[in-house]
Image (cartoon, rainbow, N blue to C red):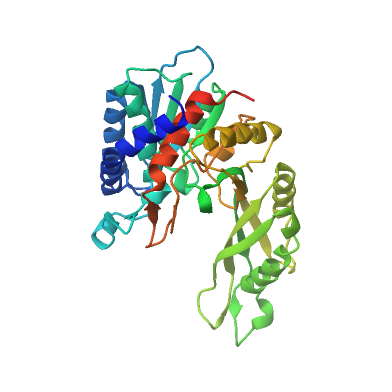
Amino acid sequence: MNGPEWLNRFHACQDSLLADLEILVNHESPSRDRQALARLCAWLSTRLSRLGASVEVHPGTDGGDHVLARFAGRSSEPPALILGHYDTVWPLGTLERIPFAIAGGRARGPGVLDMKAGLALILAVMEVFREDSSLPARPVWILITSDEEVGSPGSRAVIERVASQCALALVLEPALAGGGLKTARKGVGRFRLDIAGRAAHAGVDPSAGRSAIVELARRILALGEIEDRPLGTTINVGVVAGGTTTNVVPASAWAEVDARVATTREQERVTSAFHAIRPLTPDVEVVVSGGFSRPPMERTPAIAALFDQARLLGRTIGLELTEGSTGGGSDGNFTAALGIPTLDGLGATGGGAHADDEHVVIASLPERAALLALLIEGLKQP
């Protein structure tokens, strides 16, 4: 099929796509709720199997399991990998407050944009292949994980193992504003500073104490030296705590710090800088732990070439695709770091991800489904 034909097919099946989206949203799936995740994992596995896939369920560690569906292709070329996740940031019971709803050209509900709509797009595309009794141009492997929202601690190894066998990766995270694709993402680091001082009575013998909070405050101010905003490197001290009561010189304090970098070189520099931290106060101990959970997704020549192909394919359905970068991470960071050409942000358009007004623009769904189908059929490995 050509671009307009694909688009017409997905306009015709928009109602069934929205029906799948409602089912997906109504299956609440917080990242740490193993029972809730298991229910949606079972639904996805059954649905993908009925679409003709060979389905494997890979056991998870921190949350739910991960679903790998393999579809045969018309050629023996290396597969295209489609990445998604079915966990959300929303706690169980959010549907009582924010039920799935369609109004004003929008679909609302917890996780509807990030990224239940992306999963509905995947199912819609593979459903059309099944209805036409046709195979995609190359094998298509679909990996849907259960812990992306918490950093992919249990799925990273699976993602990397599966991706290493694939020619390219397509990530169904939400699009940028205006429908743009993501060709670069920052790497994400989490560090913790634990300060051990010396307790003393704040009124009777304060000089005998060594304030862990004062040391932490000085260390926090010094962290600004690690930042390099022109290079895209940011440091955010997000959580701090310490002390016991006001009349005791605090013997302990700690902080959790977020670090974002745009390049591998900056990741290495920032990591070294954190682990080189030493106390600024005598007789105080500073222990640094943590590191980068996601490497940066850098815009390589191969990613740029893949985007150029996508832009030409998008024009066949009237889309003038743009590209951009984002400070957030996704599982596309892992595939890109392996050297696999990766396009991210292929999911729905909308807004309010992780917020009460999270929504999807319904009119975007047929276009995004048609775009995904065109990429599966038309992309060549750069």
218 to 346, vertically: above or below? below
Q: Quick one: 133 or 144, which is closer to the camera?
A: 133
Q: Quick one: 329 or 2, which is closer to the camera?
A: 2
x, y (%) of residue 206? 65, 82
x, y (%) of residue 138? 48, 18
Q: Is residue 298 visible?
A: yes
Q: Quadrant of residue 302?
A: top right
Q: Is residue 85 visible?
A: no
Image quarter (top left, top right, bottom left or bottom right) of the N terminus: top left
Give the total of numbered labels: 0
Horizontal arrangement in the rendering, residue 221 relative to residue 154 (left or right) = right
Image quarter (top left, top right, bottom left or bottom right) of the C terminus: top right
Horizontal arrangement in the rendering, residue 308 relative to residue 32 (left or right) = right
Taking the spot 45% from the left edge, 23% from the top edge, the residue there is 140
161 to 17, vertically: above or below? above
Horizontal arrangement in the rendering, residue 301 relative to residue 238 (left or right) = right
x, y (%) of residue 118? 41, 41
Q: Quick one: 307 or 166, which is closer to the camera?
A: 307
Q: Quick one: 74 or 258, which is closer to the camera?
A: 74
Horizontal arrangement in the rendering, residue 229 relative to residue 111 (left or right) = right
Residue that protrudes farthest toward the top in the picture: 76
x, y (%) of residue 106? 34, 55
Residue that protrudes farthest toward the left in the picture: 96
9 to 21, vertically: above or below? above
